Image: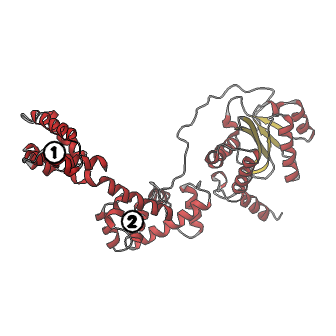
């Protein structure tokens, strides 16, 4: 503000000087030293010498003084210019002189308003047009509509069209679908895909295509993350010692026929922490899991024993990769003594154990990465417990007919009178 006042005062004093007033009188009236006034007069004369044919330096000097707060009318009178010429220069470099003078005031008003609204609402750039318009309509009695439209990046014409638009049955149905989709999406911890939402809507007697659900999810600003890239593997040679009995036969007809297992690692405070899970292929249910700081035979054997305790039986086949914790003599001997056939994936070929690989992929994408890094093992374990509970009880699985693992096992027991 001080710079703008000085610039305007300088132009006014020089104009009075050019009209015949003496420097001594001007110095006393405005409480400014004579040397400064003489300096301003000298600068003005230098600028005037640049005026010939309106040189670029002269234009730049005029524009700079406008940006500093000088009035165009005073500058035109001072340098004998027409206002239309100066406005043309301003327009050429896209400066609005009226806006230049009031920009800080306007921005301050917008900032204060935005701060108040942020305290009341959770405003994000991902808000759809309907949410923005709803907030404008809610606040239009308190704040100026034009300013609200600027804040929420909505054209005023768009706002009035939405407000005055007559609701149609199609729009009412879309709004109902959006509400139900949003409820399902957030109930499933923001990881439900369009295909799964379709199944859950059918359970509510709502018939809607997957394409329509994707469209409405886009309007709501929600989406289900997908892997953009998939790595291709070549099948290596099979080993005589570690046979693959399963041979990717992941669809089993009875429980506890085939269990599959694997381990994964994340780092907590720069130290590795391992998670081992065992899944029953019949229902895709996680029947056992353990955490450990060491990835060894004792770790995987404890996970297996826990699964046996939970299921009260051993499987017919146990399939895993060729990690040393699964191929060790102690692990193989324990399972063989309980008449369990051992099956192993081909080396470096994860497709042979795709069910567990898929579980870890979803687990990390849906539960780990959003909360990573973890400060303690306890916080990581809490995430594991919550996710596996959700995975077994609520998450729909395409491989078992878009139902949950618990429901799959419940239907089997009911049909077989168990």
- Describe residue 185's horizontal placement relative to residue 272 as left or right: left
Kindly identify which residue carries mark 2. 133
Mark before the other along the chain sequence, 1 or 2 = 1
At x 22%, y 54%, the residue is 98
Quarter location, residue 389: bottom right
Q: Is residue 46 above or below residue 90?
A: above
At x 90%, y 33%, the residue is 330
- Describe residue 211's horizontal placement relative to residue 36 as left or right: right
| Image coordinates for residue 245, horizontal then vertical, percent | 77, 36
Viewer-side residue, 262 vs 418: 262
Quarter location, residue 125: bottom left
Identify the secondary structure beneath mark 2: helix
Would you call the spot at circle 2 few (<14 residues within 10 Å), some (14-19), or many (20 or more)?
Answer: many
- Describe residue 212's horizontal placement relative to residue 144 as left or right: right
| Image coordinates for residue 69, horizontal then vertical, percent | 24, 48
Identify the secondary structure beneath mark 1: helix
At x 90%, y 37%, the residue is 336
Viewer-side residue, 266 vs 210: 266
Q: Is residue 93 visible?
A: no
Q: Nearer the viewer, mark 1 or mark 2?
A: 1
| Image coordinates for residue 161, horizontal then vertical, percent | 31, 68
Viewer-side residue, 414 vs 268: 268
Q: Is residue 151 above or below residue 59?
A: below
Whole-angstrom CA distance, mark 1 to mark 2, is: 61 Å
Kindly identify which residue carries mark 1. 24
* Quadrant where the image shows the C terminus: bottom right
Viewer-side residue, 159 vs 263: 159
């Amino acid at each position: 503000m001080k710079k703008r006042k000085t610039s305007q005062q300088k132009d006014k004093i020089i104009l009075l000087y050019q009209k015949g007033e003496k420097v001594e009188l001007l110095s006393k009236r405005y409480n400014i030293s004579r040397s400064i006034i003489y300096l301003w007069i000298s600068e003005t004369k230098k600028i005037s010498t640049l005026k010939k044919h309106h040189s670029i330096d002269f234009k730049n000097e005029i524009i700079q003084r406008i940006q500093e707060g000088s009035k165009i009318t005073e500058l035109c009178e001072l340098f004998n210019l027409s206002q239309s010429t100066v406005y043309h220069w301003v327009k050429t470099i896209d400066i609005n002189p009226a806006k230049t003078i009031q920009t800080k005031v306007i921005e301050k008003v917008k900032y204060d308003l935005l701060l108040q609204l942020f305290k009341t609402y959770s405003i994000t750039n991902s808000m759809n047009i309907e949410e923005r318009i709803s907030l404008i309509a809610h606040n239009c009695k308190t704040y100026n509509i034009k300013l609200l439209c600027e804040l929420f990046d909505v054209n005023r014409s768009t706002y009035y069209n939405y407000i005055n638009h007559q609701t149609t049955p199609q729009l009412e149905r879309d709004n109902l679908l959006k509400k139900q989709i949003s409820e399902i999406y957030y109930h499933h911890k923001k990881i439900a895909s369009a295909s799964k939402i379709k199944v859950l809507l059918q359970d509510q007697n709502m018939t809607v295509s997957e394409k329509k659900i994707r469209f409405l999810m886009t309007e709501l600003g929600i989406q289900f993350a997908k892997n953009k890239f998939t790595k291709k593997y070549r099948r290596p040679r099979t080993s005589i010692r570690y046979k693959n009995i399963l041979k990717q036969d992941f669809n089993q007809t009875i429980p506890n026929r085939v269990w599959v297992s694997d381990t994964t690692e994340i780092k907590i405070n720069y130290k590795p922490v391992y998670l081992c899970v065992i899944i029953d292929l019949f229902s895709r249910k996680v029947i056992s899991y353990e955490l450990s700081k060491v990835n060894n035979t004792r770790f995987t054997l404890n996970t297996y024993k826990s699964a046996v305790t939970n299921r009260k039986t051993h499987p017919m086949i146990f399939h895993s990769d060729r990690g040393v914790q699964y191929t060790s003599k102690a692990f193989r001997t324990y399972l063989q003594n309980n008449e369990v056939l051992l099956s192993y994936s081909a080396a470096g070929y994860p497709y042979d154990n795709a069910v567990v690989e898929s579980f870890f992929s979803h687990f990390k994408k849906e539960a780990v990465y959003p909360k990573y890094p973890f400060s303690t093992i306890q916080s990581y374990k809490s995430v594991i417990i919550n996710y596996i509970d959700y995975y077994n009880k609520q998450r729909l699985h395409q491989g078992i007919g878009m139902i949950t693992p618990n429901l799959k096992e419940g239907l089997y027991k009911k049909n077989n009178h168990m």
